[in-house]
Image: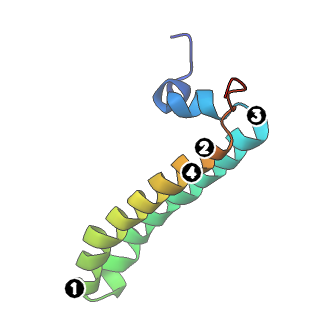
Amino acid sequence: MKKPLIQAHAGQRDHAARSRLVKAERGVGDFLHSLWPGKYLYSPFWLPQNIWVNFKVFGLTALTLVFTVLSGVYIYRHMPQDENK
């Protein structure tokens, strides 16, 4: 493989965010987003079942949707603009 697996998986995001700072910020964002499901270790043992199920079904779905939209907005802001317009 010519590219590392994570860069091949990132695809468009790698081309859109060219500067090192933007890539570092995106990496921090991805890391923080991946910490959220770690609450699975806490919620089933210490919370009532209905709260745990609602967190699992609605909380993670909403979090993923919000993270995806915010990532798109962030990447769009840092894309190179066409000078032909």
- Residue at label 3? 19
Amino acid type, residue under disc 3 in the picture = Ser
SS assignment at label 2: helix
Q: Position of residue 22 (x, y in %)?
A: 72, 42
Of label 3 and label 4, which has the lower sequence position? 3
Disc 1 target residue: 50
As shown in the figure, which amino acid type bears the numbered disc 2?
A: Ile
Of the two numbered discs 3 and 2 in the rendering, the one whose residue sits closer to the viewer: 2
- 3D distance between C-alphas at marks 2 and 4: 6 Å
Above or below, 21 against 15 in this view is below
| Mark 4: secondary structure | helix
Q: Residues within 10 Å of mark 4 (few under 14, many from 20)?
A: few
* Front disc: 3 or 4: 4
- Contact? badges 1 and 3 (CB < 8 Å): no
Please report the residue visible at 67 percent of the width from the left and 27 percent of the height from the top: 82
The kind of secondary structure element at disc 3 is loop
Q: Is residue 27 visible?
A: no
In the foreground, 32 or 84: 84
The earlier-in-sequence mark between 1 and 3 is 3
Q: CA distance from mark 1 to mark 3?
A: 44 Å
Can you say which quadrant of the picture contains the C terminus?
top right
- Which mark is drawn over residue 73? 4
Residue 47 shows in the view:
yes
Asked whether 18 or 24 is in front, the reply is 18
